[in-house]
Image: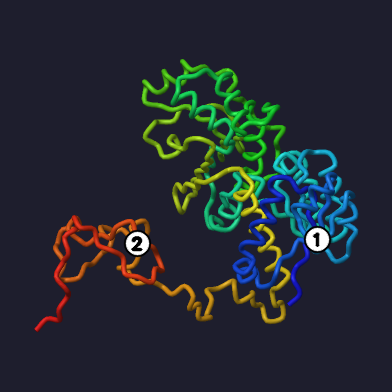
Amino acid sequence: MKPIQVGLLGIGVVGAGTFNVLKRNQEEIQRRAGRGIEITMVADLDVERAKAIAGEGVQVVSDARAVIANPDIDIVIELIGGYGIAKALVLEAIAAGKHVVTANKALLAVHGTEIFAAASAKGVMVAFEAAVAGGIPIIKALREGLTANRIQWIAGIINGTTNFILSEMRDKGLDFAVVLKEAQRLGYAEADPTFDIEGVDAAHKATIMSAIGFGIPVQFDKAYVEGITKLAAGDIKYAEQLGYRIKLLGITKRRPEGIELRVHPCLIPAKRLIANVEGAMNAVMVQGDAVGTTLYYGKGAGAEPTASAVIADLVDITRLHTVDAANRTWPSSRTPSTRPWTRCPCCPWARSSPATTCACAWPTRPACWPRSPASWPRWTSASTPCSSARPTRSVATPVPPPCRRPT
């Protein structure tokens, strides 16, 4: 089957990451999508740099509209950012009948209602998993995994820059301005960090989650937004003494009179899981009426974490193209494979690494083993999954006698 052809607008950090992940995991991605996915055309103002990243076989142009006008392009990825030219290009791609994948949270939070209406009228998809929380699949969780639930509230650490700053202020007792400069030096903060430290970036993401979770139009202009610029080292210290930690949260909540949408620093009990999300990591909590509270944690930014989300959207759209409408069937990769993957056989429990097994959680034990889980066999960290050699037992670990059939 002919591969899906993709056009890329803007090949910066995330664009380069998308190329790398697609190339490295090409076989797995094709199996899961049901057909190949190829970026065949790239538009970027720095043509020479784009050619160096894209390599041979990819057409590179400086005019983004040339990508949209190409009839062979099925999907357009928008990674330009901002509200201006990005909006015009996305709407033009939709009008041309192209599916769109974007990581542009600012564009969707402000103009999402217009863009989604245009896509619906044209019968194309706008996918945006990468727009919120980078590599955390929170949009898919809200839209699909929790679809049986009436969402009650969503709260999350959805800006890595501010979380890094607050973590450093707490750990080192430094003031905001000092840590901000360090964050800029390390690359965690932009040269102009206003959107991050004033809470605007988090508000963009909270707006999108609110729309998906509660089925409302995007309403960024209704959000209450407060950043972390007024916090001092003393605030962090006093909160710690009282058993709390300060985190910048994006919160959206269902109330009888409507939907709350707000971003501001919050006091969180130090024992809560979300209070212990440190550095530039992100985490989102979702409360559903059926499932209760769920927590999603991971990298909220970076080349390959964001590329992971971009490619997940590409795979979803490719499956839509590949579905056999007449027989109402999905590609075989939609379900567990029936092919013999002999290169990576399923390993017996004894070969599993300590990180993937927890003996004390198993409901049963061999009859000949000691009753106490603490005395059950453990393998040293030298063992690895799918290893051809049997792992080495730790010298300090008691070894049970071999199992024998009852006489």
Q: Position of residue 142 (x, y in %)?
A: 57, 52
Residue at figure coordinates x 61%, y 43% from the top left: 301
Q: Is residue 186 left or right of residue 354?
A: right
Count neighbours of disc 2 (C-alpha within 10 A) and say few if under 14, some if 14 to 19, many if 20 or more: some
First of labels 1, 2 by sequence position: 1
Instruction: Indicate the secondary structure of the residue bearing disc 1.
Output: loop
- How many numbered circles are shown? 2
Residue on which disc 1 sits: 58
Residue on which disc 2 sits: 383
Q: Position of residue 256 (x, y in %)?
A: 56, 38
Q: Position of residue 388 (x, y in %)?
A: 38, 72
Amino acid type at mark 1: Val
Outermost bottom residue: 407
Count neighbours of disc 1 (C-alpha within 10 A) and say few if under 14, some if 14 to 19, many if 20 or more: some
Amino acid type at mark 2: Ser
Q: Is residue 256 left or right of residue 87?
A: left
Residue at figure coordinates x 69%, y 74% from the top left: 323
Q: Is residue 332 left or right of residue 322?
A: left
124 shown above or below 293: below
